[in-house]
Image: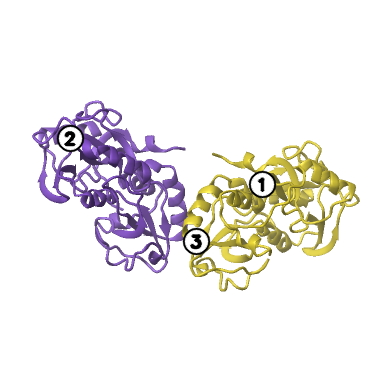
Chain colours: A yellow, B purple
Amino acid sequence: MVAVEAKGTGKNIRAQCRAGTLSTQTSGLAPGYVQANIVILPAASANHFQTFCQRNPRPCPLLAMSPEPGAPTLPELGDDIDIRVDLPQYRVWRNGVLAEQVTDISGLWQADWTAFALGCSFSFEEALLDAGIEIRNLTEGVNVPMYTTHIPCAASGPFSGNMVVSMRPMVASDAIRAIQICSRFPSVHGAPIHLGDPSQIGIADLSKPNFGAAVTVKDSEIPVFWACGVTPQVALQTAKLPLAVTHEPGHMLVTDLKNTDLAIF
Amino acid sequence: MVAVEAKGTGKNIRAQCRAGTLSTQTSGLAPGYVQANIVILPAASANHFQTFCQRNPRPCPLLAMSPEPGAPTLPELGDDIDIRVDLPQYRVWRNGVLAEQVTDISGLWQADWTAFALGCSFSFEEALLDAGIEIRNLTEGVNVPMYTTHIPCAASGPFSGNMVVSMRPMVASDAIRAIQICSRFPSVHGAPIHLGDPSQIGIADLSKPNFGAAVTVKDSEIPVFWACGVTPQVALQTAKLPLAVTHEPGHMLVTDLKNTDLAIF
């Protein structure tokens, strides 16, 4: 199990991002606080993206969005959030292609932009670790392996594509416990969508993830698959919008919500 | 899916047993009502059995017991229950060996006897069917296949033995849903205890169950295993008590509780 370095609150991490003193990955920072994937879109595509999230809640669990077009705030996630400066790093996409990686988007922000915050697997990984379940990608110190499946998302406007899943191997008793635990957290991808035979969801080779790094799967273990937050990023690239902004992978918005706040029972 | 014949309430079924007009299996009777496994023991072993159930709640979920030794009642399960006459059929065990099958134990009842009612898989099978999940043993019209595992129960007095499990094959997505649904019902065995490779829990051959009948397992399916109410019956046989009474398998006590009453969330 990877040691989690206790380092402040969501508010504290955001203040450091805003001051320009923090631009690293946020994994392990502010333990207990919800971290979120961020997608920022102009008005022309924002409504379509909102509907894409609503139609595909497992890969795209919408935690919060700007209260009105042009507002760089997410009041449900923290009363002082300025989404233009509160992330450690951003990706700027032009015509579906990564154009820049920056630490501040104040100069880019437009009066019709909407920010979307989507739940992230960090929250359920914390709940699983708290339950004594090993998370192999953390043990092995790599990015979780992610795979493109043959499961189509429900399309909305320019947004479409197949679901991407993350995979964590575990013994059956841990898989059962993980299903129970993750079912309590639908806003951070919820229960796994598949377990066992990868070919049933269109994955040919577990040792060749489409994103992240392969991890060891022991003979005694089964692969367990969760809908993954990379799905909306792939849909975004496919949509080839003139301009869009996301967080840099691993460099999340750290919010004031606690992971335990997300439990539905 | 097997058609469930709507046939009265728990009270109605018990009245027919008491009147001697019903001595059949109770599967499918009084749909929606909780049916229970019954174990009746003399004072010398009742406390040990109560502790055996408390220590092994997955195979032996104790729903209710006689309010005092000698009381043939189970007031939590129905205010008019007379456990001496309210089952369709009983088994009488002498020295761990099946001695008689009878429809009335009034003549045997002793002043120090205690009746135990344990949760039964009928309740969770109903919840799974309601969710649109196929139960293979019902589809194929056979008794669910049951297997002795290498998982030891926690012993208590003369009661010990390995856990017996029932097996229902399903596709992964149904297995995940079944784990979620059954987790709501800990008093009727709760979530599965294993899925996938049977050898991991000491089962050599799925086509050779120790109790019940084998069912078809399709290539696309994984076997899912639940702790089973046959476990206490095996423990009872192993204990070789001079005298004990149980229900005849499949011939359950039909109670006034509704299956939905058992959901913990």
Assign a secondary structure to mark 2: loop
In this rendering, position of residue A170 left or right of residue A215: left
Label 1 vs label 3: CA separation?
A: 31 Å
Same chain, labels 3 and 2: no
Q: Which residue is mark 3?
A: A171
- Specify whether disc 1 shares its chain with disc 3: yes
Q: Residue at x 42, y 59 (%)?
A: B195
Quarter of image, res A91: bottom right
Q: Give the image location of residue B114, x and y in percent.
A: 22, 34
Residue at mark 1: chain: A
Mark 2, residue position: B86
Residue A255 image position (x, y, % from top left): 74, 43
- Is A154 on the left or on the right of A253, as rendered? left
Residue at screen point 37% across, 47% down: B58
Tag on residue A62? 1
Locate residue B112: give its quadrant.
top left
Residue A143 is marked as none
Q: Is residue B16 left or right of residue A182?
A: left
Tell me: residue A60, above or below residue A67: below
Residue reaching furthest to the top: B79
Q: Nearer the viewer, residue A87 or B5?
A: A87
Name the chain under label 3: A
| Quadrant showing the C terminus of chain A | top right
Q: Is residue B78 above or below residue A168?
A: above
Q: CA distance from mark 3 to mark 2?
A: 44 Å
Q: Amino acid at mark 2?
A: Asp
Residue type for callout 1:
Leu
Say what amino acid the circle numbered 3 marks: Val
